[in-house]
Amino acid sequence: MPVERHPLTDIVIGGAIAVHRSLGAGLFESVYERCMCEELDLARVRFERQVPLPLKYKRANFPIAFRVDLIVEDWLIVELKAVERLLPVHEAQVLTYMRLSGAKQALLINFNVQS
């Protein structure tokens, strides 16, 4: 069953389209991430960048097991990629981030595409 899209996701997707139209494909993920932050700032959307995600396993605690690229308005995970094509491991990564953080929605955006 598809999840109903929140208006905030349209803002994030619109920002990603603006970044891609301006820069095109072929850059490092970190460049796209910084430019996405600029788009979110301009849209006056609250976000955090490179958010540490902890993991607990039995008695072991990992305070920074993962880093989420962006968390928008405390509930939307945005994972950015600059890869030839998205693979099942990228989707699994986002689903893991959602499970560990409790987020209900996420966007997986690949900037290394023609359009």
Image (cartoon, rainbow, N blue to C red):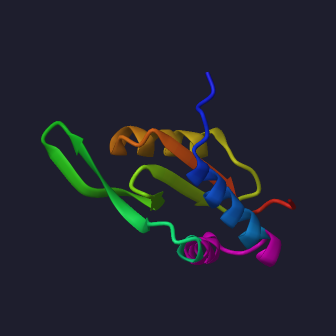
Assign the C terminus to one quadrant of the image.
bottom right
Identify which residue, 42 or 81, lies in the foreground. 42
Q: Residue furthest top?
A: 1
Identify which residue, 112 or 39, lies in the foreground. 39
The question of residue 27 being in magenta is answered with yes
Position of residue 92 measured from the top left corner of the image (x, y, whole percent): 53, 39
The question of residue 19 being in magenta is answered with no
Position of residue 53 measured from the top left corner of the image (x, y, whole percent): 33, 54
Position of residue 32 measured from the top left corner of the image (x, y, whole percent): 64, 72
Identify the residue shown where x is 53% and y is 46%. Answer: 106
Residue 46, quarter of the rendered image: bottom left
Query: Is residue 59 depicted above or below 85 in this figure?
Result: above
Q: Residue furthest left?
A: 59
Q: Is residue 10 visible?
A: yes
Query: Is residue 66 depicted above or below 50 in this figure?
Result: above
Residue 79, quarter of the rendered image: bottom right
Identify the residue shown where x is 75% and y is 63%. Answer: 17
Query: Is residue 46 depicted above or below 59 in this figure?
Result: below
Task: Magenta stretch: give its range.
Answer: 21-39
Q: How many marks?
A: 0
Assign the N terminus to one quadrant of the image.
top right
Q: Is residue 78 left or right of residue 57?
A: right
Q: Residue furthest right?
A: 114
Position of residue 38 measured from the top left corner of the image (x, y, whole percent): 58, 78
Q: Is residue 111 visible?
A: no
Query: Is residue 13 depicted above or below 21 in this figure?
Result: above
User: What secondary structure is the magenta-colored segment mainly?
Assistant: helix
Residue 27, quarter of the rendered image: bottom right
Identify the residue shown where x is 17% and y is 46%. Answer: 60
Q: Is residue 45 left or right of residue 10?
A: left
